[in-house]
C-alpha cells in the first residue's frame, strides 16, 4: 500500500530550479496494476524514482507499507529497496557477462537470502516469465524481449510489494511490447503482484486497470481503465 | 482467468533482518566479476606483473653483479695488510735515501705477536722457467709457507711447500694454474722437474685458478721457498748485508683489528728504522685492502642505484597502467554500481566488492610478477653464469608499491561511484 500526499520535488541546477513534482496525491493498493501516463517531461520518472526510494522528495509525505520513507537514511533506503521493490528498466540493465540465472539472483544477495534459496527462487521466477529454458544464457545471447523478461524475473524473484517499470517497452517493437504487457498483466492477475508502469503511450497504458495521468508535475486524471485489452 | 483463486508461486521471503553481504558471498561476487571479465582482469594485472617483474629482476641482477665484482676482489683477502717500500702518498721515482724493505723488517713484525696470520715476506723477480716441453719467462716469488694461508691459496693438485722446505731452502716450486698449463699442457706436473734460471726444482703443487688481482694474476706466477730465492736464484744482499724483500703481507684474524694492527706495524717499523728520532716521514707504506674495497663499493653502489632507477621507472609505468585500467573500468562499471545500488546494495557492499577485486588483482598480479621477475636471476644462478639470488628487498619494495597503486586506484573511484545517487549512476554513459 502506497500513500503519497502533497509530494513535491525541486531539482536545482545552478541558479535554475526545476519543479518536477508540484504536489502529487496518490494512493495505490496492493494488487493493483496501474499505469502512470503523461507527455515527456511531465514528471513521470521523477515520481517513479520517489516511489522506488531511489531519491527523496523535497516536501510531502510518502508511506510504503506503513514505512515513512522521507525519514530514512541511505542505508535504510537500500534495505527498503531490497525488500519491498522490484525494478524493471527501459534498457533492461542486465550484467552483461553473467548468466540469466545469476542476474536474477543478484538482488537477493543484498538481503541475506541463502544461496540455495536464491537459486530456487531465481529458477521459479525465470519459469514464470517463460525463460526457464534459457537460464544459462548471457544477455548478448538473448533478444530484447527475452532480456526484458529476465529483467522482470529479477524484479519479482524476491516477492516485492511493488514492481516498478519505467517505460518497460520503450526499447521494444510493438509485437514484443504487447507480449511483455500481457505477461505483466498475467503476473498481476495470477501472482497477485502490484505493478506500476510508466509510459507516454496510451496503447501501453491500456493494459493496466487504472490510469493516472500527470502533467507538469501534478495528477490531472485518475480513472479506471474501461477499454480493457483482451 | 479472473475466477481462479489467487495463489502466489513465489511466497514472500521471511525476512532475515540481515542487510548486505557476508564475506563469503562478497568474495564470490568479486571473483565472479573478475572471472566474467577476463580481459579486463588480465589487462589490469599486466601493469602489476610488468612493474613487479622488472623491479625484482633488475634489482636482483644489480645486486648479483655488485656482489660478483666485490667478491672477486674480496677473494684476494679483505683482511690483508700489505707493506711496501716507499713514502706514502707519492708516486714512483722518489728521491732521497729510502732504506729498502728487508728480512729484518719482517722479523720485527713477527716479534710483535699480533693476532694475525703471517707475516709473509715476498721476494720476487723475473726468471725463465724451463720444462721439457716449453719454457716461459715468469714472475717467481720467494715466500714462506704462511703465504698459502694469507692469500687463501687453494691447491688444484699436490701441496704447498712447508716450513721445513723454507728452512732447508729446498729446491721445490708451486706453479700458478695458467703457468702450469703453459708448461705442461693438460698433463701431470706434480713430480716433474723444471729449471728456474737453470736451477733444477721439483714441482710439488699446482694452485687452483684465482683470477686477476691488482698486482698481476697469481695464476701466471711460480712460488719457491724465500730462502731458495735469496741464496740460489736472485741477488738479494743490500749494502749493509741484509736480505731484501719486495713486500710483506699479513691478514688480521678479526676484521675489527685492522686499524690497530696497521698502527702497531707502523710504529714498530718507524722504531726499527730510527725515523722517530728526527721525526722523518715513513719510508714504507702499509696498505689496507679494505680501503681499496670501499672505493670499489662506490662504483657498485652506482651500478645498483642505476638499475634500481630503471626498475623504478618501470614500476611507475606499470602503476600508470594499473591506474588507467582501473579508472576506465570503474567508469564503465558506474552503471553496474547504479544497478546494484538500485536493487538494494548499500554503498558499503559496493565498496567492499571493489576492494576485494582490487586486492585479488593486486596480489595475484604481484605474485605472478615475482615469479616472472625471478626466472632470469634463477636461470643465471643455476646455470652458474652469475650468482644472483632474488633479494627480499626487491620483492618487498615492488609488491608494496604495486599493491598500494592497485588498491588505491581500485578503491578510490569505486568509493566515489558508490556514493553517487543510484539514479545518477544508472544514467551514467
Ligand atoms: N536529475 C535531474 N536534475 C535536474 N532536472 C531534472 C532531473 N531529473 C528530471 N529533471 C527535470 O524534471 C522534469 C521531469 O522529468 P522526468 O520526471 O524525467 O519526466 P518524464 O519521465 O515524464 O519524461 C523535466 O523537466 C526534467 O528535465
Ligand atoms: Mg521518463
Image: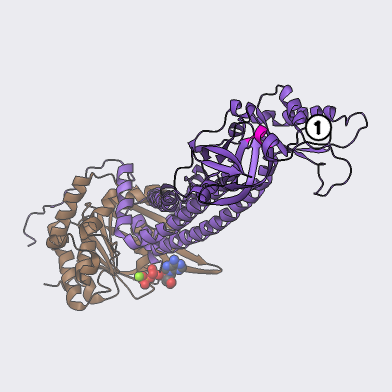
* A197 within the magenta span: no
| Quadrant of the drawing holding the C terminus of chain B | bottom left
Where does the image place residue B367, in percent across and percent down from the top left?
40, 49
**Which image quarter: residue B237?**
top right
Ligand 2 - quadrant of the structure image: bottom left
Residue stretch in magenta? B225-229
Question: Residue A220, located in which quarter of the rendered image?
Answer: bottom left
Viewed as shown, does residue B46 lie left or right of B76?
A: left
Q: Which residue is mark 1?
A: B241
Which chain is assigned brown? A
In this rendering, the answer to whether A138 lies above or below B243 is below
Q: Does residue A53 appear in the picture of this structure?
A: no
Nearer to us in this view, B146 or A62: B146
Residue located at (53% from left, 58% from top)? B316
On screen, residue B217 above or below A55: above
Q: Residue furthest bottom?
A: A174
Give the colouring mode of the picture. Answer: by chain
Q: Residue at horizontal 20%, vertical 65%?
A: A149
| Number of marks | 1
User: Left or right: where does residue A165 sit relative to residue A10?
Assistant: left
Q: Name the residue nearer the viewer: B287 or B30.
A: B287
Q: Residue at x 7, y 54 (%)?
A: B5
Look at the image and tell me in which quarter the N terminus of chain B lies.
bottom left
Q: Position of residue A21 (x, y in %)?
A: 41, 65
Q: Chain of mark 1?
A: B
Q: Colour of chain B?
A: purple
Q: Is residue B228 within the magenta segment? A: yes
Amino acid at each position: 500500500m502506497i500513500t503519497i500526499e502533497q509530494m513535491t520535488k525541486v531539482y536545482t541546477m545552478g541558479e535554475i530550479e526545476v519543479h518536477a513534482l508540484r504536489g502529487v496525491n496518490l494512493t495505490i493498493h496492493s494488487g493493483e496494476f496501474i499505469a502512470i501516463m503523461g507527455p515527456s517531461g511531465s514528471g513521470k520518472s521523477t515520481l517513479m524514482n520517489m516511489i522506488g526510494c531511489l531519491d527523496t522528495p523535497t516536501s510531502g509525505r510518502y508511506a510504503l507499507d506503513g514505512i515513512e520513507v522521507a525519514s530514512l537514511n541511505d542505508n535504510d533506503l537500500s534495505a527498503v529497496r531490497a525488500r519491498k521493490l522490484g525494478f524493471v528498466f527501459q534498457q533492461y540493465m542486465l550484467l552483461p557477462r553473467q548468466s540469466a540465472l545469476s542476474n536474477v539472483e543478484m538482488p537477493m544477495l543484498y538481503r541475506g537470502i541463502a544461496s540455495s534459496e536464491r537459486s530456487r527462487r531465481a529458477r521459479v521466477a525465470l519459469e514464470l516469465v517463460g525463460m526457464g529454458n534459457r537460464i544459462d544464457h548471457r544477455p548478448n545471447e538473448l533478444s530484447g524481449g527475452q532480456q526484458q523478461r529476465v529483467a522482470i524475473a529479477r524484479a519479482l524473484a524476491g516477492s516485492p510489494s511493488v514492481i516498478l517499470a519505467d517505460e518497460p517497452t520503450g526499447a521494444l517493437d510493438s509485437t514484443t511490447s504487447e507480449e511483455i504487457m500481457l505477461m505483466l498483466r498475467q503476473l498481476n492477475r495470477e501472482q497477485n503482484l502490484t505493478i506500476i508502469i510508466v509510459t507516454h503511450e496510451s496503447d501501453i497504458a491500456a493494459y493496466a486497470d487504472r490510469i493516472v495521468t500527470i502533467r507538469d508535475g501534478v495528477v490531472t486524471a485518475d480513472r479506471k481503465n474501461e477499454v480493457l485489452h483482451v | 482467468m479472473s475466477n481462479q483463486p489467487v495463489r502466489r508461486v513465489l511466497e514472500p521471503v521471511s525476512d532475515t533482518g540481515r542487510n548486505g553481504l557476508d564475506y563469503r558471498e562478497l568474495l564470490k561476487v568479486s571473483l565472479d566479476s573478475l572471472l566474467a571479465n577476463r580481459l579486463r582482469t588480465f589487462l589490469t594485472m599486466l601493469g602489476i606483473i610488468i612493474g613487479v617483474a622488472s623491479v625484482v629482476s633488475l634489482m636482483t641482477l644489480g645486486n648479483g653483479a655488485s656482489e660478483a665484482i666485490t667478491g672477486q676482489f674480496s677473494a684476494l683477502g679483505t683482511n690483508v695488510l700489505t707493506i711496501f717500500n716507499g713514502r706514502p702518498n707519492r708516486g714512483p721515482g722518489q728521491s732521497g735515501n729510502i732504506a729498502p724493505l728487508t728480512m729484518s723488517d719482517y722479523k720485527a713484525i713477527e716479534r710483535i705477536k699480533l693476532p694475525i696470520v703471517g707475516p709473509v715476506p715476498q721476494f720476487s723477480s723475473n726468471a725463465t722457467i724451463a720444462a721439457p716441453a716449453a719454457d716461459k719467462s715468469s714472475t717467481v716469488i720467494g715466500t714462506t709457507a704462511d703465504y698459502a694461508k694469507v692469500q687463501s691459496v687453494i691447491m688444484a693438485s699436490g701441496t704447498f711447500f712447508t716450513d721445513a722446505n723454507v728452512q732447508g731452502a729446498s729446491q721445490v716450486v708451486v706453479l700458478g694454474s695458467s703457468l702450469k698449463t703453459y708448461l705442461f699442457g693438460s698433463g701431470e706436473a706434480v713430480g716433474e722437474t723444471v729449471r728456474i734460471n737453470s736451477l733444477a726444482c721439483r714441482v710439488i703443487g699446482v694452485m687452483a685458478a684465482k683470477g686477476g688481482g691488482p698486482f698481476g694474476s697469481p695464476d701466471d706466477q711460480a712460488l719457491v721457498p724465500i730462502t731458495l730465492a735469496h741464496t740460489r736464484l736472485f741477488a738479494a744482499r743490500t749494502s749493509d748485508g741484509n736480505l731484501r724483500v719486495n713486500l710483506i703481507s699479513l691478514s688480521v684474524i678479526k676484521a675489527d683489528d685492522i686499524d690497530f694492527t696497521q698502527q702497531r706495524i707502523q710504529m714498530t717499523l718507524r722504531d726499527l728504522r730510527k725515523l722517530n728520532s728526527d721525526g722523518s716521514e715513513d719510508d714504507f707504506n702499509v696498505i689496507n685492502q679494505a680501503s681499496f674495497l670501499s672505493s670499489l663499493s662506490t662504483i657498485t653502489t652506482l651500478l645498483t642505484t642505476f638499475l634500481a632507477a630503471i626498475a623504478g621507472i618501470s614500476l611507475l609505468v606499470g602503476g600508470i597502467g594499473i591506474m588507467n585500467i582501473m579508472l576506465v573500468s570503474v567508469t564503465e562499471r558506474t552503471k553496474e554500481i547504479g544497478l546494484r545500488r538500485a536493487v538494494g546494495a548499500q554503498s558499503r557492499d559496493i565498496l567492499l566488492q571493489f576492494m576485494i577485486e582490487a586486492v585479488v588483482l593486486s596480489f595475484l598480479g604481484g605474485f605472478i610478477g615475482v615469479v616472472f621477475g625471478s626466472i632470469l636471476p634463477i636461470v643465471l644462478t643455476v646455470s652458474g653464469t652469475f650468482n644472483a639470488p632474488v633479494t627480499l628487498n626487491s620483492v618487498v619494495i615492488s609488491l608494496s608499491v604495486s599493491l598500494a597503486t592497485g588498491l588505491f586506484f581500485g578503491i578510490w573511484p569505486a568509493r566515489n561511484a558508490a556514493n553517487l545517487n543510484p539514479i545518477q549512476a544508472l544514467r551514467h554513459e
